[in-house]
Amino acid sequence: MKKVNKVLFSLTLILVLMFPTIAGAVNVEQRLMPFVPSTGLSTNEFVIAHESGNSNNVGPDSLEREISFMSNNVNSAFVSHWVGGGGRAVQIAPSGFIQWGAGPRANGRAYAQVELARTNNAETFKKDYVTYVNLLRQLAKEAGIPISLDGYGKGIKSHLWVTQNLGGTDHSDPYAYLAQWGISKAQFIADVANGIGSSNEVKPDPIQPPVNPNPPVTPSTGKTLNLPGTATSWRVYGLNSSPTAGNEVGFLNPNLFGGLSYSILADRSNGVYEISTRDFGRVQIYGATSTGATVTGGTTTTQPPTNTNGRISQTGTFFMDRTINVRHGSPSTSANVKAQYFAGENLTYDSYIKAEGYIWLSYTVGSQRYYVAWKVINGEEWGIIK
């Protein structure tokens, strides 16, 4: 028996040396949906990275709600895996069979498709992101394809890559959502290539804010910051950090209350204020007029400078979450389209204007002025302002 045990131990040691444990291996919960199609793949080339795109589902139960919705609508669309809930990975359909998540030109070529549920909590996102990256890598290894993102040939592909290279779909995830948390396209590509160890800290690329991170604080006299009731998510930041994505300590949801109003405790200039909230204490918040926020009260009211064309001077950076046309000459849907920005890209603007029911951001290239629609007035936004 001892001799047999020694032989078994030797074989085990050889296998461990030949096939080392995958760093950052992901534990995947199995909750396969019934009645999913069992159609085989035409080829085995991709693992596709998605995110839910659902800005109305960002709470602590967002993962379960997304899985429940997909399970009840499996005949419309489904993927093999979900990530969320603070680093959980859940498989709901078999890998290696067709899934309906990336359009007809990619579905039959994708070994697995992974959706990332949204969250409004920074710590939850960090855990989700580590699992998301490592699960994509793990599935690529299972499929026997290169562990590279959005490169040439086989490999891990974003939904944006599918749209741009295969067509049959118009989605552009997951880059815009990742950018909201300070994860650039370059960092996502590098993280997928290298993996993230369980002890590694996720360090988002810094996003340059449109304001001085620590400007001199000037007292405010009885002014109130009003957040519109149409907004569902508004970042707040600690007093000693730059007010940029990735540094938030939490989110406010004005929509739940038909709008929120806060006394301005200090004006840090350039649209950054200090307020006191019930859940987060004294924090910074970005409430420039272009966000839809308004400031009322006080002994004086400062109006933003307006030029002769009706544009209001304000600088900032706009991060797109979808494809948006660039209009030349005037803020109008009938103006000539000169270019397009895609999800995950950004532009720096010098002013904005309200026209045709939209808020348009404006910038110049040389002597020419261009306009990009940011949002419907008091309605849907097509990206975020920093």
Image (tube, helix red, strand yellow):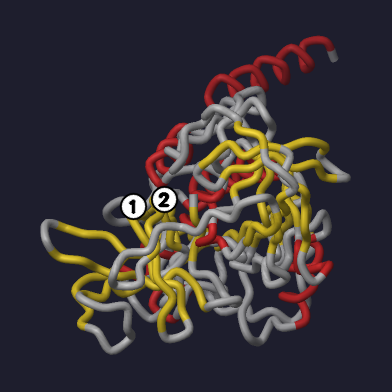
Q: Secondary structure at mark 2?
A: strand
On the image, the x and y values in percent for residue 209 come to 46, 40
- Residue 12 visible in the current orientation: yes
Identify the residue at the far front of this view.
299
Q: Is residue 21 above or below residue 209?
A: above
Amino acid at circle 2? Gly
| Front residue of this view, candidates 244 and 284 | 284
Q: Is residue 238 left or right of residue 327?
A: right
Residue reaching furthest left? 367
Quadrant of residue 187 within the rendered picture: top left
Q: If the image is split into quadrants, where does the N terminus sit?
A: top right
Secondary element under disc 1, as helix, strand or loop, is: strand
> What residue lies at 41% left-to-right and 51% top-to-bottom?
317
Residue assigned mark 2: 316
- Residue at 54% over, 77% down: 377
Q: Residue furthest right?
A: 278
Cα gap from disc 1 to disc 2, whole angstroms:
6 Å
Position of 78 with respect to 214 (left or right) is: right
Q: Residue at x 56, y 79 (%)?
A: 39
- Is residue 165 visible in the rendered image? The answer is no
Give the tally of numbered discs: 2
Q: Which residue is mark 1?
A: 348
Say if mark 1 contacts mark 2, CB within 8 Å.
Answer: yes
